[in-house]
Amino acid sequence: MSIKSYGQSFLQTDWKSGIAVFLVALPLCLGIALASGAPLLAGLIAGIVGGIIVSWASGSQLSVSGPAAGLTIIVANAITEVGSFSGFLVVVVLAGFIQVILGLAKMGKLGSFFPSSVIQGMLVAIGIVIILKQIPHAIGDDLDFIGEFEFHQIADGQNTFSELVNSLLSINPGALIISLCGLLLLFFWTTLSKKLPLLSQLPASLFVVLLGVYLNASFELWLPEWYLGNSKDHMVGLPLFSNLSEIAQSMVSPDWTVLSNPQIYSLALTLALVASLESLLSLEATDSLDPAKRISSADRELLAQGAGNIISGFLGGLPITSVIVRSSTNVYAGGKSKMSGFFHGILLLLAVLLLPHYLNKIPLACLASILLYTGYKLAHPSQFKKVISEGWKQWIPFIITIIIVVSVDLLWGIFIGTTMGIGFVIITNYSSVFSVYNRQNEILIKFQKDVTFLHKMAIKEVFRKIPSGTEVYIDTTKVHFMDHDIQLLIQEFISSARERGIEAEITEIKKK
């Protein structure tokens, strides 16, 4: 796209989607930093770098990067093992360089090896996790940070389901009303826009936030017991700085003396591999959501993520990945180009520099309603219907992926779902590579596709059961490749056929 095209895209839709992504990303950046045991500013720096830098370097038009909830445990453990956050920043920088090397080595294509049923299962599972995790925030239970997506919760030791049950026992009326009003506004925004065309030019998420702030202010005046602003737990919690020099003093620099510690290199490799895998999975998922069906460069994405982590580490930020929650919010908010991700980074920067007092008036309940709406879009019932209609070899990996992601975590869900998907591919390939046709004393063995050693046992069994006095024709004209083991097996059968009273003939393999 040209600069003019980016400008037009921004004016038409990307500024609106950028606001929606910003409103989702803001509490996530803060919460992930808190859960990782890092300074709050570190999460915001990562979000800013992900938006302003990585969005332009990325291989995707719609992918949005920032600190990822999936890395919180790795980050928290690494900070403990290194001994300081400043030492951990060196790990982030080294991980970035490893990702750049992976990108230059064209390793991004590994993301294409994940079955579509698993990617679809991942998207639906993330939607379900978002819904389960945001319901407590929507009813006023804000003990856990709003961006936590792990099944076993860090803050209180509970899991997703026990937290949900406990939350339902103590509903905060103010939070419930704010979140319900926000959800109603989001679901009926399209209908309202048809009656009031001007609304279609404005972002629904911004009105959700304004409505939440207004309702909370009204509670302070008329229903103080419902007011959420008397506790920082229920509100956005941006750190407050009086001037730019105070921000600069709060930024942590890498402690390069830890380079002598051999442990940081294994930590950097682990971080690079996990962050790269999450980014590639998010990229595949975002491409599947893209209405324009654009295909992103995975190798360029690794280079972009690597560059982002190098810069984030130098500036004192958390590690960065492409994040499906932000990216899907971008898609459903109408994002069309890189400008939405870039604009969300600019807004995060302005939030730190100019707007902390105002943004701290936003209740988390109204942000939860935005995330609940995104979760509903991701886990829409039509997704289940579509995959189930494609047959059991598609919906079984799909369902398994959902169950594992929801009850364990994202990477385990992808690993187990992909393993099952590959298993079904092997079964299908094993059972359909050749057909056997019988007519009186004649047998035709017709190979339909390429043959590998995996089919050796099945072919041996067919040869073993051929009775004496039979004429056998082996047709390999459709085979492009035949494993050496199979060639030997056929040759041995033909050479020994006469001794068994069998006449065997083979059509030669075409060399292509």
Image: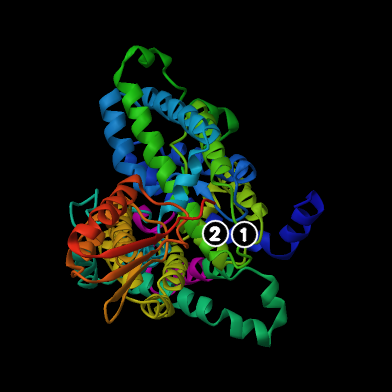
Q: Mark 2 highlights which residue?
A: 287
Between residue 13 and residue 85, name the one nearer to us: 13
280 shown above or below 97 = below
Ranked by sequence position, the earlier of labels 2 and 1 is 2
> Could you tell me the amino acid type at mark 2?
Asp
- Determine the image quadrant of residue 460: bottom left
Amino acid type, residue under disc 1 in the picture:
Arg
**Residue 105 in view (yes/no):** yes
Q: In x, y percent, where is residue 233?
A: 34, 54
**Residue 92 location, quadrant:** top left
Residue position marked by numbered label 1 in the rendering: 294
Question: Of all residues shown, which one is farthest toward the right?
Answer: 4
What x and y, as percent, mark residue 108? 50, 43
Query: In the shown orientation, is residue 253 left or right of residue 4?
Result: left
Within 10 Å of disc 2 (Cα), the crowding (few <14, some 14-19, many 20+) is many
Q: Is residue 230 magenta?
A: yes
Discs 2, 1 touching: Cβ within 8 Å = yes
In the rendered image, residue 491, in percent from the top left (x then y), is placed at 31, 51
Q: CA distance from mark 2 to mark 1?
A: 6 Å
* Residue 401 vs residue 263, the one in the foreground: 401
Residue in front for this viewpoint, 98 or 481 = 481
- Mark 1, other Cα within 10 Å: few <14 / some 14–19 / many ≥20: some
Name the residue at 72% across, 58% down: 10
Q: Report helix, strand or loop for mark 1.
A: loop
* Highlighted range, magenta: 211-236
**Count of marks placed on residues:** 2
Residue 307 position in % (x across, y down): 55, 33
Q: Is residue 429 magenta?
A: no
Label 2: which secondary element: helix
Residue at 46 percent of width and 72 percent of height: 377
Q: Is residue 242 above or below residue 410?
A: above
